[in-house]
Image: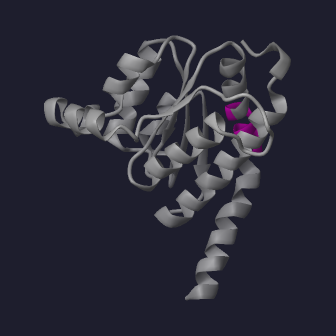
């Protein structure tokens, strides 16, 4: 079992080579927004919620470079807000309601869903697009409905949720590295 799991994991990661252009496009969307003084909002459920927090932490804190903080908000962290929205509007609105209150045109929403079909994530995408935000995504399997919402999207080539999530964290780290490398820090607004 151990060898099979590792082999399957490595195959999923190896297949990310096919997504190099998409990863670069996602980074460019983030760099353009951050360079213009906008922010990145991130959402996802379960393990994808943890990935959202991880990405925001790397941007607000630092990934490798000792540099200024970047504007990033994980929409998965405010338990009072999440539970109030879920209670009053239903769980499907937990991210879209936050996007409505926090996003501005030019911001970026990174939508993370292993299936690509999470209604709460898709609703956030629709809200973000209606406000003039760029939407990028991380998903797996066949991309699901998320494909239709994203300017740039990486689909982890696996049917296994764990391997999809493992690929997503690699992409998140690549995005952090590319953002740190490509931002014009002297001109940051």
Horizontal arrangement in the rendering, residue 154 relative to residue 175 (left or right): left
Residue 111: x and y in percent read 49, 37
**101 inside magenta stretch:** no
Specify the quadrant that holds the N terminus.
bottom right
Q: Nearer the viewer, residue 13 or 148?
A: 13
Kindly report the secondary structure that dominates the magenta region of the rendered protein.
helix
Q: Quadrant of residue 79?
A: top left
Q: Nearer the viewer, residue 53 or 28?
A: 53
Residue at 43% over, 43% down: 44
Q: In the image, what residue occupies the spot 70% across and 40% down?
A: 62
Nearer-the-camera pick, 182 or 26: 182
Question: Measured along the vertical axis of the image, is residue 149 above or below residue 118?
Answer: above
Residue 89 in percent (x, y) is at: 18, 29
Q: Left or right? Give the position of 185 relative to 99.
A: right
Give coordinates of residue 63: x percent, y percent: 72, 44
Q: Which residues are magenta?
A: 20-26
| Image location of residue 33, percent across then percent down | 65, 19
Q: Is residue 47 left or right of residue 169?
A: left
Quarter placement of the C terminus: top right
Question: Is any atom of residue 11 visible in this view?
Answer: yes
Q: Give the vertical position of 108 relative to 36 (above or below).
A: below
Q: Is residue 68 above or below residue 79?
A: above
Do we see residue 160 in this rendering? no
Q: Which residue is drawn at the image coordinates 65% and 14% (left, top)? A: 37
Residue 24 forms part of the magenta stretch = yes
Front-most of residues 3 and 97:
97
């Amino acid at each position: 079992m151990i060898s099979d799991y590792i082999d399957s994991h490595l195959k999923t990661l190896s297949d990310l080579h096919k997504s190099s252009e998409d990863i670069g496009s996602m980074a460019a969307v983030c760099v353009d927004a951050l360079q213009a003084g906008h922010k990145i909002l991130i959402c996802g459920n379960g393990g994808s919620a943890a990935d959202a927090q991880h990405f925001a932490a790397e941007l607000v804190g630092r990934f490798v470079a000792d540099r200024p903080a970047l504007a990033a908000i994980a929409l998965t962290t405010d338990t009072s807000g999440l539970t109030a929205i879920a209670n009053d509007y239903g769980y499907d609105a937990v991210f879209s309601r936050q996007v409505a209150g926090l996003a501005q045109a030019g911001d970026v929403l990174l939508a993370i869903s292993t299936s690509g079909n999470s209604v709460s994530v898709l609703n956030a995408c629709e809200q973000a697009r209606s406000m003039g935000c760029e939407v990028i995504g991380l998903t797996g399997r066949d991309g699901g409905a998320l494909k239709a919402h994203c300017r740039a999207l990486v689909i982890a080539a696996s049917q296994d949720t764990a391997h999809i999530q493992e690929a997503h964290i690699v992409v998140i780290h690549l995005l952090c590295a590319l953002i740190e490398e490509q931002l014009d820090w002297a001109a940051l607004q």
